Amino acid sequence: MNISFTTINKDNILSILPLLSIINTKTPPDILKERVVEMGNCPNYECVAVFDEDKMIGICGLWYSTRHYLGRSVEPDHVIISEAYRGKGLGKLFFNWIYEYTKGKGCEAMELNTYSTNTKSHKFYYNEGFNIYAFHFAKILREDQKFY
């Protein structure tokens, strides 16, 4: 393996769709594509990736904000490592890179959400020193009231 970490250019943001589609099975593909393009155009968002040679094997979106209770913070989002590469310590390497990368951008803290049923991620985040401080609630405002 020849592993590297880098940011994804906003012009190439759709390259994350194959990996993103693995964890997002509820959003129709056309809506997912539209949302990813919109995210790529947000000034407080960027996407970083793990590559093995020239093959993208992991992604993580980063949302930047300043919060009254944390200061300048970053929220990792849609974190995924390709199944064939799981269990090899890449998640830890990726997060170590993300910690240094975002500290270099002035971030003082990190917070994230993970689905309550994703127990493997819970163990990973606990091992990374994350603690549960709150619950994340969502309310769908669309007429169909569906989560996608």
Image (cartoon, grey):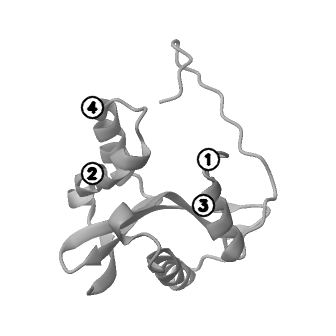
Rendered view: 123 above or below 36: below
- Badge 3, how many Cα within 10 Å: few under 14, some, many 20+? some
Three-letter code for the amino acid on which mark 3 is drawn: Ser
Rendered view: 50 above or below 120: below
- Badge 1, how many Cα within 10 Å: few under 14, some, many 20+? few
Name the residue rendered at 64%, 55% in the picture: 119
- The residues bearing labels 4 and 1 have C-alpha atoms spaced at a distance of 23 Å
Circle on res. 121 = 3
Q: Quadrant of residue 32?
A: top left
> How many marks can you see?
4
* Between marks 4 and 1 in the image, the one whose residue lies nearer the viewer: 1
Is residue 9 shown left or right of residue 142?
left
Name the residue rendered at 79%, 59% in the picture: 132
Do callouts 1 and 3 mark residues in contact (Cβ within 8 Å)?
A: yes
Rendered view: 72 above or below 142: below
Circle on res. 18 = 2
Q: Which residue, given by chain and number where applicable, does mark 4 sit on?
A: 30
- Badge 4, how many Cα within 10 Å: few under 14, some, many 20+? few
Q: Which residue, given by chain and number where applicable, does mark 1 sit on?
A: 115
Is residue 68 shown left or right of residue 24?
right
**Can you see residue 107?**
yes
* Between marks 3 and 4 in the image, the one whose residue lies nearer the viewer: 3
Three-letter code for the amino acid on which mark 4 is drawn: Asp
